[in-house]
Amino acid sequence: MARDSDQRPLLDRPDEKTACFVHSLIAGEWDPTHQARDVQDLVHAAIDDDILVEEDDDLIVTQTGDQSTKKVVHSRHLTKAQLSDMAWNVRKLSKKLDSIKLKLSVKNVFIITKAGDETVIAHTREIVQWFLSKDRNTNYTVYVEKRLETESEFAGPQILKEEPSAAGRLKYWDVDFVHEHDHLFDFVITLGGDGTVLYTSWLFQHVVPPVLSFALGSLGFLTKFDFNQHQKTLESALKDGVAVSLRLRFECTIMRSNPLPEGSGHVKRDLVEELIGEEVEGTLTHKPDKVVQILNDVVLDRGPNPTMSSIELFGDDEYFTTLLADGACVATPTGSTAYNLAAGGSLCHPDNPVILVTAICAHTLSFRPIILPDTIVLRMGVPYDARTSSWASFDGRER
């Protein structure tokens, strides 16, 4: 994020235009003498304060990473000053966005429909027809899920037949297409409930366009708009602009333990010593395996095991405690109303820059839900001598 108000960003792709409102907002705040960053990745995902959670045959680690870089930043090498600087600038950016209405330049519209609900398909068709109509001042290109291509109720060919001017502007997406072309989309519309919004967050792992959500599901914490007023809502958003709510996301990195060097014998490994002890040059105890961005929570639990989990909890370079429970839920402020609430955790306003840690059916009375600042490096680890392994899930996926 920006460090000084008189600095301007150095773009990796200066010739590539974007409708990203955050990009246009902060474009006058960085200096090209600073280290180059992928600004589009950073600003489209400014919804993130970037926290990393990592699993291992024996380990899950949570760390704060730099979304703008393509490589993984190991949490123990990220200084407290870097974390504080990053978090402060995200809050500064969020405060600016809360106080203004942003006019978007939209060409490519991405529509996500609640899976398994046939009643939503007809509503999707209405939205598509509205965008492709010759009455619009802009020739929008609309992307809908590929499964709708063969749905008789959606009837894509019939839409094009009724509106010949829309030829070539109705396209279909699948997961691979989104991951390869995440910079392409200017605006996202979701039709469903909170699960559809979470699926959107999972789809856009790096670049997150503005998301407008219509409530057509069972839960509506994240879906503000009524579909009955969708034409009025869309006209107002595209013509007059939108008010934006930035949401903190966690970046979760699964870490795998490296085998001991040959000749080490039967050395007893200590997770606490490996994570916060003195590092031996040229020796890496763990390696990153996979990175996942989450909007709600990461849950580490006992999975199918009959006995409870044993979880080591670390903050910065300090050992916090060993948690004996069915599991632990690390939630964003947005996710405070989800599993965190069911497990007895605190409710939190989405503007609060915090990390919520809640035990799931704790075995001891001494562990209570805790709220940590977003400047802390949080790690969760399963000790080597734990009786059972643990399982991790990210926004209920990737288990």
Image (cartoon, rainbow, N blue to C red):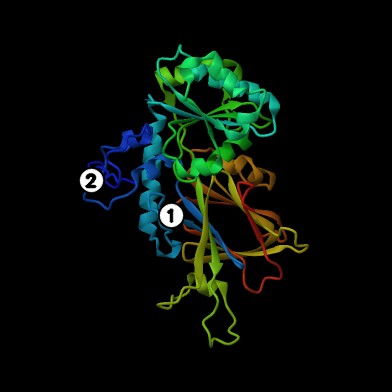
What SS does tag 1 mark? Answer: loop
Residue 296 picture location, percent across and down: 58, 44
What SS does tag 2 mark? Answer: loop
The residue beneath circle 1 is: 65
Q: Residues within 10 Å of mark 2 (few under 14, many from 20)?
A: some
Amino acid type, label 2: Asp
Q: Using the rendered view, name the quadrant where residue 64 is placed.
A: bottom left
Amino acid type, label 1: Gly
Q: Is residue 2 visible?
A: yes
Q: CA distance from mark 1 to mark 2?
A: 22 Å
User: Residue at left 22%, top 47%?
Assistant: 32
Residue 299 picture location, percent across and down: 63, 53
Check the image and name the residue furthest to the right. 306
Label pair 1/2, CB-CB below 8 angstroms? no
Residue 105 in the figure: left or right of residue 330:
left
Residue 289 picture location, percent across and down: 52, 61
Residue situated in front as seen by the camera: 26 or 373? 26
The disc, 1 or 2, on the residue closer to the chain's N-terminal end is: 2
Count of numbered circles in the view: 2
Q: Relative to residue 85, is residue 229 depicted above or below?
A: above
User: Residue at left 61%, top 26%?
Assistant: 215
Which numbered circle lies on residue 31? 2
Residue 376 picture location, percent across and down: 46, 56
Q: Is residue 204 visible?
A: no
Q: Relative to residue 366, is residue 206 depicted above or below?
A: above
Check the image and name the residue furthest to the top. 135
Which numbered circle lies on residue 390? none
Q: Residues within 10 Å of mark 1 (few under 14, many from 20)?
A: many
